Image: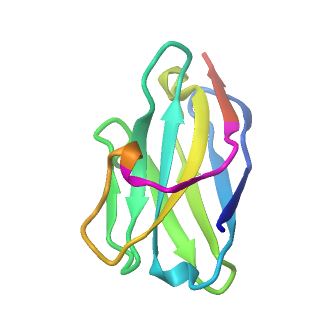
Amino acid sequence: QVHLVESGGGVVPAGGSLRLSCAASVSYFSLYAMAWFRQAPGKDREVVAVITYSTVTTYADSVRGRFTITRDNVKDTVYLQMNSLKPDDTAVYLCAAVRSLGTTRTDPNEYDYWGQGTQVTVFS
């Protein structure tokens, strides 16, 4: 069983920054692909960033250059550094995990484990 707990959300003005964390309770964390998704009211869940077991990263076009995903395999934690935030970034951000040594996965249906989410609100 994998348990994911997100933290770090909040309310910030446009142009501000936040750092999200996702702590995983799992054996062999390093073998998991980790991802951040987000879901705004009335919209589908969308991928924000993915980091594979080998630390290959992938970003949504809307966040590339502003967001950075990293992982710490000692602390079993994945991070999302979000800079230059925009009101359109407002959403619930969810951490997801799947045990995978394969290619990058961006479809939420490919992930087996999810956190409860953390709210990010950006005001103009």
Residue 100, x across and y down, in percent: 37, 73
Task: Kindly identify the residue that appears in the image at 34 percent across and 64 percent down.
Answer: 57
Which quadrant of the figure has residue 50? bottom left
Q: Position of residue 13 (x, y in %)?
A: 66, 26
Q: Bounds of the magenta span?
A: 110-118
Quadrant of the frame with the C terminus = top right
Q: Is residue 99 above or below residue 64?
A: below
* Quarter of the image where the N terminus is located: bottom right
- Reply yes or no: does residue 113 show up in magenta: yes
Given residues 74 and 25, the one toward you in this image is 25
Q: In the picture shown, does residue 54 fall above or below 82? A: below
Left or right for 118, reference 112: right
Q: Position of residue 12 (x, y in %)?
A: 70, 31
Is residue 58 left or right of 99 when viewed as pictured?
left
How far across and how far down the image is residue 52, in percent?
38, 71
Residue 49 horizontal side relative to residue 19, left or right: left
Is residue 35 inside the magenta stretch? Answer: no
What's the colour scheme?
A: rainbow
Q: Is residue 39 above or below residue 61?
A: above
- On screen, residue 112 versus residue 79, left or right, reads left
Q: What is the total number of numbered labels drawn onto the structure image?
A: 0
Q: Image point 56% across, 33% down: which residue?
A: 15
Q: Residue furthest top?
A: 42
Question: Is 117 rendered above or below residue 105?
Answer: above
Q: What is the residue that sits farthest to the left in this orientation?
A: 103
Q: Nearer the viewer, residue 72 or 87?
A: 72
